[in-house]
Amino acid sequence: MPEVSLQLFFSYSHKDEALRDELANHLSTLARQGVISSWHDRKILPGEEWDHQINDNLNTADIILLLVSSDFIGSNYCWEIEVTTAIERHNTGKARVIPVILRRVDWSDTPFAKLQFLPKNAEAVTSWTNRDEAFTNVAQGIRAAAQQLKEERQQKLTLARKETAIAEYRQLVEEFAADGEISFVESEILKDLQEQLGLTDEEARTVRDKALEPYGKYKENLDKYKQIFTKLVDEQGYPLREKAKADLKKLQQYLKLKDEDVALIDNEAEVQKQEAEILQQQQEANRLQQQQEQSEVERRQQQEAQRLKLQREQAEAERLGQEQQSTPNDLSSEKGVDYTRLRDLLKAGKWKEADGETLAVMLKASGREQEGWLDFKSIENFPCTDLRIIDQLWVGYSNGRFGFSVQKRIWESVGKDRDEFGDRVGWGKWRTVIVDKWFGLKQKTEKQIEWLKYSDFTFDRSAPKGHFPGASIYEIRITVWGSQVTEELRLEISSLALRLINCNV
């Protein structure tokens, strides 16, 4: 069976992508040899959720490379998500974290400052006279770490297999030794199992001796108890008197006998009585079974109804709990704006009215009620407290489907492409059109985005993720010039995304 490659995860800033590619080239030999298989966010396929893909690969990686630079340290996502998860997995032994200094930066007070850095002496790659030498040193360090990690895991695996083998052998030994001895046939079976499990004679002997040790003296005590019990039954008959039972209980405790072993001895004198009781119990069980069968359908229906009721109650409790956790309690505005109506509309699921109210409160908070729309400047200076309240209300009452922060993540995931963003959040649809060129002498087809009218938005929970809020950042203004009608699209998501970052939303 081929050896499984170690999964290597690149945590880096996109501004260091060129340096990451150079490092990946230096690791190509390790990849071809099957030592590692690397992953970074550029391997996310179109249509896949980037945040989900990053988390999955980060949480399954064996080696996590932190490509350290000023941009890496300055990235909120790298710092708060990837570095935090990486250090946690390193501390629990689930992964090996290796910081690689790409460009000089002060890393002395970072969570990974105590780890072993690459290249040697923690000298940044870009500070080396020959960059190939720096990356070669990094690749050699990663190879050594990968080999050490494989050896450690192999040792743990070997030890675990040995412990499992001994446990399996011990279980069968204890089963055979339950009567105080191991027969010839049982010994042959154990010998065959020992060979299958690869146990040495010393290991097998130790397990067997320990399993049989208590049975020798125990069997003698059990025989002594049986002799005294039999003598009392011969003298008094069965069942025994209360005084005899009390004396036998004291004898059992003195000899340290198990209740089940004593019960077996007592049962031998009660066989006939037990058979009669068993027959009576069987008849009673048959009667009860007939009664149960008569009401089985009704009982199952009641159980199913109760299960569904509990399920609905639990779902409702979880929903209310999520709303209480996700929605803000403090609606205090920096600009004195009242957000109670927006909260009530969202809570009632009135998405269209809530979207209109969102535009209204944002205009009021930015002082643009007279203009009736938000421009770049008003968005860039929008109060952080108010922006956070609006976003938390949308995210909380939509269970994470809608909100400015949701739109920001989608905007970044599509590379800040306006048309791709519009398609993802359901504000537009792709279509193929024929484009005339050179007065119709040459034609070609191209893909264009067809933007929806705001009235055609989907105003319910089935809307695509990030569909709302829309009225405050999406608008098509129709302009009439003579007899010509033109449409101008205003999509302020770029300015809003930057403001969200600055406000840490």
Image (cartoon, rainbow, N blue to C red):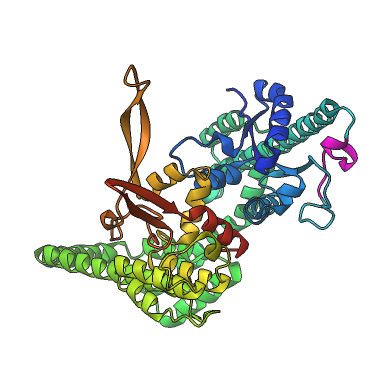
* Residue 486 lies in the magenta-colored region: no
Residue 74: where, in percent of width, then height?
71, 53
The residue positioned farthest toward the front in the image shown: 482
Residue 253 lies left or right of residue 118; in this view the side is left
Q: Residue at x 87, y 27 (%)?
A: 130
Tell me if I can see residue 119 in this picture: no
Residue 277 lies left or right of residue 18; in this view the side is left
Task: Find the magenta span and give its range.
Answer: 115-127
Q: Examine the rendered structure and indicate whether residue 35 appears above or below residue 330.
A: above
Q: Residue at x 49, y 75 (%)?
A: 365
Report the label total. Answer: 0
In terms of depth relative to the viewer, which is nearer, 259 or 317? 317
Place residue 100 in its image quadrant: top right
* Residue 124 lies in the magenta-colored region: yes
Tell me if I can see residue 21 in this picture: yes
Place residue 224 in its image quadrant: bottom right
Residue 288: where, in percent of width, then height?
16, 67
Q: Examine the rendered structure and indicate whether residue 360 appears above or below residue 489.
A: below
In terms of depth relative to the viewer, which is nearer, 206 or 410? 410
Q: Quadrant of the N terminus?
A: top right
Residue 455 lies left or right of residue 93; in this view the side is left
Q: Examine the rendered structure and indicate whether residue 114 appears above or below residue 101.
A: below
In terms of depth relative to the viewer, which is nearer, 418 or 434? 434
Residue 16: where, in percent of width, then height?
70, 39
